[in-house]
Image (cartoon, rainbow, N blue to C red):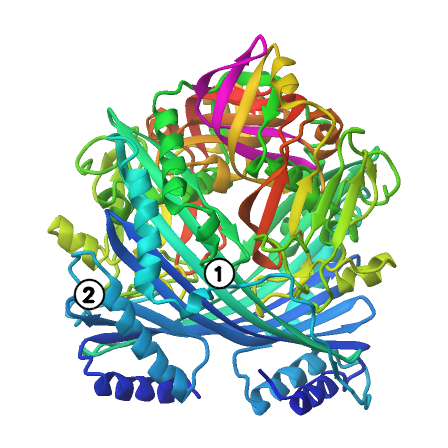
Amino acid sequence: MIAKDLLDKVLQKAMSSGADFAEIFVERTKGNTIEMIDGKIDGITDNLIAGAGLRIFKGLRSIFASTTDLSEKGLLACAAQAAGALASGTAEVTIRLAETIPANIHRIERVPSGVPGRVKAEIIRQAYFGAKEYHPAISQVSARLMDTDRNILIANSDGLLTGDRQIRTRLFVSAVASRDGENQSGSAGPGRQMGLEMFDRIDPRQVGTEAARQAITMLSAGYCPAGRMPVAIENGFGGIIFHEACGHSLEATSVAKGRSQFTGRLGEQIANIKVTAVDDGTIPGAWGSVNIDDEGMPSQKNILIENGILKSYMIDGLNARRMGMAPTGSGRRQNYLYEPTSRMTNTYIADGPDQNEEIIRSIHHGLYAKQMGGGSVNPVTGEFNFSVTEGYMIRNGEIQEAVRGASLIGRGSDILMDIDMVGKNLDYGQGMCGSVSGSIPVNVGQPLLRVSSITVGGR
Amino acid sequence: MLFEAFKEAVIAAAKQAGIEEYELYSVEDNQSQVSTYRQEIDSFSSTVSGGVCFRCIRNGRMGYAATELLTEEQAGEIVRRAAANADLIENDDQTCIYAGGTEYGKKETGSVSVPGSDALVDFALRCQKAAYGVDPRVADGTSSTAIATASTVRIYNSKGLDLENTSAFSAAYIESVVEEANEKYSGWSFRVGALQDDILQELAEEAVQKAVSSIGADTAESGTYTVVFSGEQMYTLLSAFAPVFSAENTQKGLSLLDGKEGETIAADCVTLVDDPFYPGSPVQTPFDAEGAATRRKNVIEQGVLRTLLHNLKTAHKANIQTTGNASKYSYASNISVSPYSFYFAPGGQSLEELFAQAGEGIYITEIKGTHAGANPVTGDFSLESSGFLIEEGKRGRPVRSFTIAGNFFTLLKQIAAVGNDLVFDIPSGYTVYGSPSVLAEGIAVAGK
């Protein structure tokens, strides 16, 4: 995207006031979203994101500047601005960039940005009618197909010059069921690091049907009861419990500055012995995968917790300095406007020793959380929440009537010990995770598991 | 290429493509931010962002395309893509590029200057020092941040409209961490406005006191409570449920307020105001994202729903005038609907009087996870909360790790009193939510 000679010059300029590290990140991302509502294509957004973010470090201090002007003049001005903000002496540095091409682990067969809109509209139509025709009480459906084609280039003063092209596709359907002046909603949103070949494996009509099924089920459900009880959390997006209760607190963003419950606890038992948790950015075709992170480091599989023992944090370049530890390929950013920091990729609890039927049978009175919504956490205190969007009561070891959504809340350090049964059907769910470096695609995942006791926010 | 030159290139490309009705919408944002760790600046950032969106009408349908790269090639590209996108649109909505005609209101904000980076550095360091000085238990992880931001929106269209509005403000916030007996507690405070000495100590004390006052908090007992929401928490709830007041959502069946204009939807003491010119707001605008004039209105007046929020399209469907609430989530987005300074009008009672009226109950000072635990389509919410018990009409011991659950439409009717302590959130675009403390009865609490 930018000539190597110019990158050399920009980095030299950025280093000219005494920085000990400089990095430029150049991005060109095409984004396209087509939405159908009321049975008609109703809205299209079509955008090109283009710009550069430039960082310099001096010790633990970071300075960041961005520009949308990718001309020589614009990039040098951006570098001069960053260097000017540091003003820690003068230096003449020679940069010799050596280009590296990372291994591409994601085969893309049909690049969405090159496919005519009418072909995409047909996929959306199938999803829409899959939901709309599911039941007469479905009053509204919105079906969206989103694709991004992200080209990035990263060069730094250590001589690194690399880049990646990341293509993602996601279908998102939300359905509303109405009866007697009351609404209930349901949604489904599979996403992959794939092109439109994603729909060779995922039937768009089924995605619509799933969203509608949830809305209809909830329409005739009663309220969820309130209080502490055992909860069986289903696979897929159920993995949000680990993402919120522990994942964010293992990001160096929190750990390095003591803003985490898990600072200084490597090698200690922080979870039940049945819990092994992984952040793996290398899963082919997965929503949260990246060939390289946004600092140019190859993505890797990081074992976070092994049989309950804390093994690793997720660490970016700057926090690696602060912590005196190696980075883990976890530096991510929404786009060039954000400084990268440690973030999750595909984070999951691995299959465990228990039989899924046993998990349900073990609960005398509790909740079966089948579908989950999002959540949040305060890493300082470890207090987290996430919402159940489709639940069922369990009585005497059997799944019974459906109950409406409620939040589940707790503290990360408690809940990790309370995950006392782990089943065998690991699967993933897709989400957008929001944090200091913006909104990024992540997978969460787990098999069916049991939490022995958690506060259920019903009424 | 600067905006003016890019605009000319787009006009030429549109003409060549035979497109007669079109609009250019441009946003340029400049933001500087300084953060601290211990007693040092650990990060400084300065970003320039924004882009240009082109939309046009072809065969009665509206197409959009946007870019951040202002080049000759992109000028032609966004015209071509917007036209192609218009051809895919299937809805029968009334489309229009606005010609103007109504008179624009006047902003009350004077100058739009914001502090430079030296002033930000200085203020952030002094906040940090003040925070550590409030209490010996203040610990690492405490961080002070100062921000200056400016945003310029331009609209130029084929009907002769040529508008520009700049808004700018500075803000500071402190995130405190307090440690006692190996347990950590957090607090947070912010101020939007001039970074002056007189707010410094207050800001530091508020952030640290929030953390300190939660020490020793226990879980509340499950049950049904009378609840006092702090202003900050009530506007957090309002922000989660603001989409229910959008005519775009009512018309699409995504809000239960469809057809409820003129009906009582809230308690008598509830008045909800939308004001693009709220005095003191740093994000005032005389025109909306379609170029239509904005104006103040009561959305709820003493419990009665007076109007929904409209843009040109939704107003045409409802056969009324637009309320001037057309918005864009980002420069690249399609036109939607958003409020401006959107707030519950203050009542007459102090916070202490609300506690006295409640007698026994819970004072909610934090709710979390509204993006997941509050659903504007159904009105249902179930939210992680913390706060204090209200005992014998006074603020009592701290409580945390419980949820409050209910339905927003029911909550509006459960409001029994509104306080006099109106506060506002940090603006996002031209939207900023506000509320005084509010007393509501019959809220379900799940704890132990």
Contact (CB < 8 A) between labels 2 and 1? no
The secondary structure type at the circle numbered 2 is strand
Near-viewer residue (A107 or A179): A107
Say which amino acid is labelled 1.
Gly
Is A48 one of the magenta-colored residues?
no
In the image, is B97 to the left or to the right of A260? left
Under mark 2, the amino acid is: Arg
A299 vs B267: above or below? below
The lab-note entry on whether marks 2 and 1 share a chain reads no
| Chain label for disc 2 | B
Q: Is residue B208 visible?
A: no
What is the number of callouts on the image? Answer: 2
Residue holding disc 1: A195
Specify the segment rendered in magenta: A382-410
**Location of the N terminus of chain B (image quadrant):** bottom left
Q: Main secondary structure of the magenta part?
A: strand
Residue A9 appears in the picture as rendered: yes
**Does the magenta-highlighted stretch encompass residue A387?**
yes
Q: Indicate which disc residue B61 carries.
A: 2
Q: Which residue is drawn at 64% across and 49% down?
A: A346
Question: Could you say which quadrant of the image residue B216 lies in?
Answer: top right
Query: Picture quarter containing residue A317?
Result: bottom right
